[in-house]
Amino acid sequence: MGQDLPITAYALLGLLSFDDPLTGYELKQRADRTLRFYWVAPAMSQVYSELDRLHGEDMVKAHGDGRTTSYSLTRKGRAALTRWMRESEAGFPVLKHPVALRLLLGALVDPEAIRGLLSQHVEALDHEHAALSEVRASLVGSDGPGEPFRYPAMVADWGLSYFAHEKAIIEELRQRIEQDR
Amino acid sequence: MGQDLPITAYALLGLLSFDDPLTGYELKQRADRTLRFYWVAPAMSQVYSELDRLHGEDMVKAHGDGRTTSYSLTRKGRAALTRWMRESEAGFPVLKHPVALRLLLGALVDPEAIRGLLSQHVEALDHEHAALSEVRASLVGSDGPGEPFRYPAMVADWGLSYFAHEKAIIEELRQRIEQDR
DNA sequence: ACAGCCATGTAACTCGTTACATGATTAC
DNA sequence: GTAATCATGTAACGAGTTACATGGCTGT
């Protein structure tokens, strides 16, 4: 039986473990809203093809009303997801940080360009922080011990703290660059 | 002319902008040692095929002594790199965080498993912090204003701060989970 | 002599993206 | 009626990985 799925497949199963019957379209929205902060926002087409695969493995059940198709976890799907949680190694995060990469090469351009780079990144951080704050706010009320969104709330708080810290570092770096004038 | 290269190609050009003639093998070592913290550690085979492409574009020059081949930046390569620095948008970082993804789904397993997950991540963070510290230490002495490793040192400090903060958040989350006992 | 590292590549494959294409439903 | 959103897919492609294959050099 097809064992090892790509992690993104488990991520989608994970989203289904919260809100059960979801269409591919809805799944993509959930991913864009939450999953993108610490995993990826898969392309629409990938969501559909991944759902196809999961359906072929009997890990999701399709509820088709003709025009739209909703998917829910099967027993097998939930079992696969929890087994993956228990038995697989997490591995270290992979960060693709275009701002850090460009800062590394800062000597190639004038300091003004680097200042612009960092300013833009701070703006982007503010933007993302605000978006994640909204998500976090929507969990208030069901984020206590034993409640369904306890863990998602933790992850959201983690993300918010990360964004705040990132911003603080950038400010430090900015001052360090300012000294070179 | 083949314009848009994958960012990883620019990352390799960037490595060459510090230590000029490097073999594919050495390039891979540099990437594993430094680039991996904020970009990627490309596979050996990708380093070679990317060098082939860059060579085809006249962005690197090959110094072959038969058995080994070293590559250095051409004028065109350096120009392409600085143009990329000046003209392309940086974009927001992409984080693939398997620990956060698993924490999100914490409700599926028993708290003990989550504790283990977080412990292991803290260990990994310590390990990576130590590795990056070594890199940072090797830059001391040429990390002042105007010196060649000024910017790489900034990026390394950024990374170290990030790891330290990550560890602090995990400790907080651990306590939060401990309360549910 | 043998292990381990240095050094270079090819082939097959998967993940994931972009571009394209279609059409129904909803809000104004 | 018409624009935006909901909804689902296909096709072509590119980036990047793993597995495989080869062989020279270095230290013990």
Image: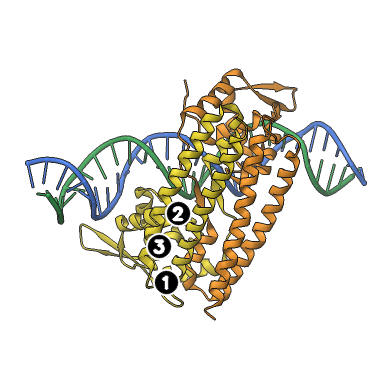
Chain colours: A yellow, B orange, C green, D blue
User: Is residue D19 or residue B123 the one in the foreground?
Assistant: B123
Residues under numbered marks 3 and 1 in contact, where contact means CB atoms less than 8 Å apart: no
- Give whichever of discs 1 and 2 has the lower sequence position: 2
Res A18 quadrant in image? bottom left
Closer to the observer: label 1 or label 2? 1
In the figure, is residue A38 to the left or right of B55?
left
- Do callouts 3 and 1 point to residues on the same chain? yes
Task: Identify residue type, mark 3.
Answer: Arg
- The picture places residue B118, in percent across and down from the top left corner, at 59, 66
In the picture, the disc for residue A37 is 2
In the figure, is residue B154 to the left or right of B102?
right
Q: List the residue tagged with mark 3.
A: A136
| Mark 3 belongs to chain | A
Classed neighbour count for the residue bearing mark 2: other residues with Cα under 10 Å, few (<14), some (14–19), many (≥20)? many
Kindly tell me whether residue A56 is visible in this rendering.
no
Q: List the residue tagged with mark 1.
A: A143
Classed neighbour count for the residue bearing mark 1: other residues with Cα under 10 Å, few (<14), some (14–19), many (≥20)? some
Q: Secondary structure at mark 2?
A: helix
Q: Which residue lies most toward the top here?
A: B75
